[in-house]
Image (tube, rainbow, N blue to C red):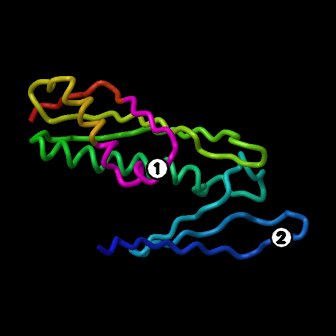
């Protein structure tokens, strides 16, 4: 079976003194739908002015990809369970730590989804926990990484249908 192919174009041009390490890490990500995203090394890794604070860094993108995948999986599972998700917000965080001399990794990502359901009453709390667990188990991105992923959902909120 052939898999799905995903592409991204990353474009960088040298600006500054490359030999001295005094060059911009600012670059551009291009995706198949025509979206262009300004990207850069994180200012916590490469000091300003050689990084760009207003751009997305790879570590942030990694955390966002995990959060986004979990969200899309969760809301689809909720739909199949006949629940209506009104809104979903996640203030996800990733922690990068040293894993060996000269090696760093994002070792933990915590997802904090805040979900509002359109319903008259709260569902059984075990349903909510089970759905998050199942979403994590089948999330494509979570299955692709070795980072610890913790899911700490906020209490469900309801809005009347």
Residue 26, quarter of picture: bottom right
Q: Residue at x 72, y 48 (%)?
A: 103
| Camera-nearest residue between 105 and 61 | 105
Q: Position of residue 154 (x, y in %)?
A: 34, 27
In this rendering, the answer to whether 160 lies above or below 40 is above
- Say which residue appears at 59% left-offset and 38% top-offset: 95
Q: Quadrant of the N terminus?
A: bottom left
Residue under pointer 1: 64
The numbered mark at residue 150 is none
Circle 2 SS class: strand
**Stretch of the chain drawn in magenta:** 135-152
Name the secondary structure under disc 1: helix
Q: Earlier in the sequence, mark 2 or mark 1?
A: 2
CB within 8 Å, label 2 to label 1: no
Decide whether residue 157 is among the magenta residues: no
The residue positioned farthest toward the right in the image shown: 20
Observer-side mark, 2 or 1, equals 1
Query: In this rendering, would 40 be left or right of 4?
Result: right
On screen, residue 57 versus residue 113, left or right, reads right
- Label 2 CA crowd tier, 10 Å (few <14, some 14–19, many 20+): few
Can you identify the residue that label 2 sits on? 16
Q: Residue at x 28, y 49 (%)?
A: 73
């Amino acid at each position: 079976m052939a898999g799905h192919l995903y592409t991204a174009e990353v474009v960088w041009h040298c600006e500054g003194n490359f030999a001295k390490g005094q060059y911009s890490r600012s670059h551009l990500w291009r995706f198949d739908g025509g979206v262009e995203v300004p990207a850069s090394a994180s200012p916590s890794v490469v000091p300003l002015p050689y990084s760009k604070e207003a751009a997305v860094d790879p570590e942030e993108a990694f955390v966002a990809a995990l959060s986004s995948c979990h969200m899309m999986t969760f809301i689809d599972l909720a739909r199949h369970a006949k629940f209506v998700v009104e809104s979903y917000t996640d203030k996800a965080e990733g922690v990068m730590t040293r894993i060996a001399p000269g090696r760093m990794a994002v070792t933990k990502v915590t997802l904090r989804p805040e979900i509002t359901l359109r319903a008259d009453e709260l569902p059984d709390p075990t349903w909510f926990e089970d759905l998050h667990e199942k979403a994590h188990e089948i999330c494509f991105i979570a299955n692709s990484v070795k980072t610890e992923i913790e899911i700490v959902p906020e209490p469900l909120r309801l809005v009347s249908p």
